[in-house]
Amino acid sequence: MTEQELKRLRTEFPILSTRVGREHLAYFDNAATTQKPRVVIDALTNYYRKHNANVHRAAHYLAAEATQAYEAARRRVADWLNVEAREIVWTRGTTEAINLVAQTFLAPKLCAGDRILLLVSNHHANILPWQQIAKTKGAQLDVVGLTETGDLDLHQYTEQLKQRPKMVALTHVSNALGTIYPIAELVTQAKEAGAYVLVDGAQAVAHFDVDVKAMNADFYTFSGHKTFGPTGIGVLFGRYELLEAMPPWQTGGEMIEHVSFAEAVYAAPPLRFEAGTPNISGAIALDAALQYLQQRDRTALEAHEQRLIRRAEAALQELPGLHLLPAGSQRVALLSCTFEQFQVADVAAYLDSRGVAVRAGHHCAQPLLQALNIDASLRISFAFYNTEQEVDSLVSAVKELLLQPYRSSQDDLETLVTQVYEAADWPSRFSSLMRLAAGLPPVATDLRAPEWEVFGCATRTWMRIERDTSGKIHLQTDAQSRLMQGLLYLIAHQVNGKQVEQINVEQVEDRLIELGFASQLSQTRGNAIRHLLSHLRSLIAG
Ligand SMILES: Cc1ncc(COP(=O)(O)O)c(C=O)c1O
């Protein structure tokens, strides 16, 4: 893709060319959700402007039009995946689709002692529905791990298949590492072992075309919003003979042939699984998203994404104290990393202050992170509309953060606090906070004890309040995140040495808000501060 072509393509995504509160936005959180092209937004509004009616039931022109568009969307998804339209069930997303299969397809077949085989890198959405039914039925979950390079441990997979699992629930592409698993080979082996196979394609279809028929999976699923379509719509493909043998998922309107008080005859799939008024506009807008993708050279788009990730990787791996997580031999444009000196949430907050949006956390893949011995990673996920300049902004912001001399400050604590209050803008305030955190004296070793932990915060946090003999407050705080350490010290700094009656927690909060923390910190961090302040209120009251 030439620079000119990319420029034009970016204009097709309104959010990329409109100011979004800040002047620049480099959006690298595409694995969480993708941005939407104008055609998708237009399809949504056009539907409500021109075609809105309920589908399948009303006998009038508008309803016929809506039904036609809704069913045409189903046919497009089917063509796109190379399956039949009657095998496409609309869901709210991947999560609902997997729950549907677990509860409606597998649960009735599952017996005590049966096994379900999962990948360690499955998203929680592809773990918990199986875990839940396994618990109620006395079945067992088995897990296939990764090799050191991040590839799936194929030897272990083969061994686990010898246990003859009833269901194998695979992930096409890992949402935390970006690894593309050799899905055709995995499905073939699982089927040879006599298992049913579900493939979670949530992170695959946004990057490359998928031929579900050739893959031969029993179920395949993805979410509209991760594929440039709207939220609230997703797709479950199920092999028709399996769908046909399944009981309904939810019951209600739209999914019946005939109802009396004594009994009901349910419609054939896929309508059997679509009780109630469906997400009509969502399906139609997803159709627009797929049409958008079909009109483009996806190989060229993918090649562009791969160039971006190589550029980012080459620059990031040079940085001291930054560790890239292994992502196997084949991967989509997504990378995850950790830092020796920084909590990933702090890095994400800093990048955000620089107009770079990334994700920090466990990415709903906690068992994977446990296996990798980490609790969080920073995830940078690309889409074809990202640019080399955006990659460079990302890299230089990370560099800026890592290479700042946080530890060399000679200033005393009072000066460091003043620097936070007097910083001219959020990025410099962020840096002064990090310097303040680095300059704090060591906290009491017994502070990180369960009785002092404050739950409900994004990072682990501890708070202890004591009164000396003259009744003065002494608040000690600690946190895993350096940014939070600095912020908590600002709170302690405002209350320590005062009598309880002299403390006004609202004023403490207002002071923090004035500094811009409420607007600059992510919602979870903002909530954490509010939570800590209410904890402080109760400590003071107690
Ligand atoms: C691999 C994978 N599976 C499932 C999901 C859940 O998708 P949704 O929240 O759209 O249902 C996600 C979302 O992050 C994902 O990345």
Image (cartoon, rainbow, N blue to C red):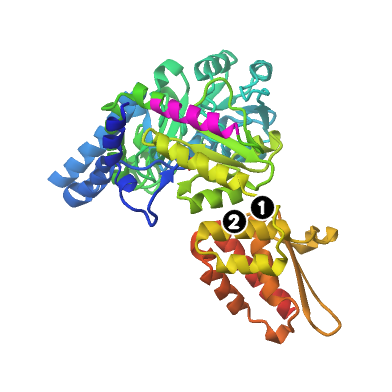
Tell me the residue that label 2 is attached to. 431
Residue 269 image offset from top left, x and y in percent: 36, 32
Query: Disc number at residue 532?
Result: none
Rendering quarter of residue 161: top right
- Using the rendered image of the protein, determine whether residue 457 is visible from the camera's viewpoint: no
Query: Disc number at residue 406?
Result: 1
- Badge 1 residue CB within 8 Å of ligand 1: no
Mark closest to the chain's N terminus, 1 or 2:
1
Under mark 1, the amino acid is: Tyr
Question: Is 376 in front, or is 353?
Answer: 353
On the picture, is 447 further left or further right than 189? right
For the stretch drawn in magenta, the main secondary structure is helix
Question: Is 441 in front, or is 190?
Answer: 441
Q: Secondary structure at mark 1?
A: loop
Question: Residue, x 37% and y 44% (percent of image)?
Answer: 275
Q: Secondary structure at mark 2?
A: helix
Question: Is 109 in front, or is 429?
Answer: 429
| Most distant residue in the right direction | 469
| Most distant residue in the front direction | 410
Where are the magenta residues, as a range? 304-318
Question: Residue, x 46% and y 38% (percent of image)?
Answer: 392
Under mark 2, the amino acid is: Ser
Question: What number of labels is visible?
Answer: 2
On the picture, is 377 further left or further right than 358? right
Alpha carbon distance from label 1 to label 2: 8 Å
Residue 119 image offset from top left, x and y in percent: 61, 28
Rendering quarter of residue 210: top left
Residue 280 image offset from top left, x and y in percent: 29, 44
Contact between labelled residues 2 and 1, with CB atoms less than 8 Å apart: yes
Question: Is 341 in front, or is 72?
Answer: 341
Residue 54 image offset from top left, x and y in percent: 24, 48
